Image: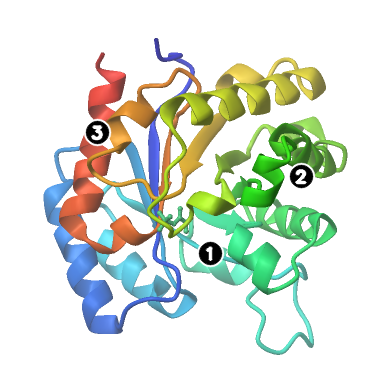
């Protein structure tokens, strides 16, 4: 059974893919295909340079847009960085923070993640906080401990009012871009763990917390994963670059909520 306090959410993470032309084609296809959708919240997290196009093509579509990263600083001499206030000016509703690719490839620590969350929240943008374990950590049996550590850094740093605005994405690192998906049961177990930990820190918030699953979600596996009681939708990488796949995943979310 799905909890009526939570609406399903499906977010595409385009990563560093596309051109202005291909992004425009994808946005137009999503806008056309999803115009009847009212049951699922949908967003795309595009590269920074495609965000003005998102604003141009998605305004009044019902589809939201967001960024994949944000600076840990508000403004100043930080060459190459993009401030949360700049994302807000472009109408970003969401920003991914702490994606495993940023943690692993760009050295993002929990402390940096917290600073980025603060910046996003101060600009009125909803952060999607990504957490997840590596394959080695899962095989050692430390999945829950790793995720508990990533969450604890945030739960202990932000006040309740800010924590209430977060979305969490559970993304097992071994499932991202690999074609390997967590089983619905594996996903449910970790999602329930995340909700329990949230409840321990913020008892009034856990039932309303949106927890997405990410890691090789495709049209053919989404429905069973989304059917799990603590899975509130998905963060979708590769399949988000294909309009028909992404729309099928949105439909799978709708079906999971209608059952
Ligand atoms: C992601 O990038 O967040 C992701 C889940 O990618 P993929 O769906 O390709 O595994």
Image point 48% across, 75% down: which residue? 48
Q: Is residue 147 above or below residue 96?
A: above
Classify 89 as above or below 61.
below
- Image coordinates of residue 34 in percent, x first then y, are 18, 46
Q: Name the front one of labels 1 and 3.
A: 3
Which quadrant, please, contains the N terminus?
top left
Q: Which mark is residue 68?
A: 1
Give whichever of discs 2 and 3 has the lower sequence position: 2
What residue sits right under mark 3 in the picture?
A: 252
Tell me if I can see residue 134 in this picture: no
Q: Earlier in the sequence, mark 1 or mark 3?
A: 1
Callouts 2 and 1 close, C-beta under 8 Å: no
Residue 75 showing in the rendered view = yes
Q: CA distance from mark 1 to mark 3?
A: 24 Å
Q: Residue at x 42, y 28 (%)?
A: 184
Nearest to the observer: residue 125 or residue 29: 29
- Taking the image in four quarters, ligand 1 sits in the one at bottom left
Q: Position of residue 59 (x, y in %)?
A: 30, 58
Per the image, label 3 sits on a secondary structure element best described as: helix
Decide: marks 2, 3 in contact (CB < 8 A)? no
């Amino acid at each position: 059974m799905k909890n009526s306090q939570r609406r399903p959410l499906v977010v595409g993470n385009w990563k560093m893919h596309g051109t202005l032309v291909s992004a425009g084609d994808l946005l137009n296809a999503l806008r056309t295909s999803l115009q009847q959708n009212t049951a699922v919240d949908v967003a795309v997290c595009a590269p920074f340079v495609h965000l003005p196009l998102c604003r141009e093509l998605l305004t009044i579509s019902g589809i939201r847009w967001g960024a994949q990263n944000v600076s840990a600083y508000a403004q100043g001499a930080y060459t190459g960085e993009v401030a949360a206030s700049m994302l807000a000016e472009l109408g970003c509703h969401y920003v991914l923070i702490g994606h495993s690719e940023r943690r692993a490839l760009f050295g993002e620590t929990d402390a940096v993640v917290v600073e980025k969350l603060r910046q996003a929240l101060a600009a009125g943008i909803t952060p999607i906080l990504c957490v997840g374990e590596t394959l080695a950590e899962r095989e050692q049996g430390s999945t829950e401990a790793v995720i508990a550590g990533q969450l604890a850094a945030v739960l202990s740093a932000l006040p309740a009012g800010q924590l209430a605005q977060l979305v969490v994405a559970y993304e097992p690192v071994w499932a991202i871009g690999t074609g390997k998906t967590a089983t619905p049961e594996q996903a449910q177990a970790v999602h329930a763990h995340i909700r329990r930990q949230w409840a321990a820190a913020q008892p009034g918030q856990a039932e309303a917390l949106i927890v997405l699953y990410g890691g090789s979600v495709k049209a053919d596996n989404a429905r069973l994963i989304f059917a799990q009681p603590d899975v509130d939708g998905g963060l979708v990488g590769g399949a988000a670059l294909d309009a028909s796949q992404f729309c099928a995943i949105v439909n799978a979310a709708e079906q999971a909520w209608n059952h």
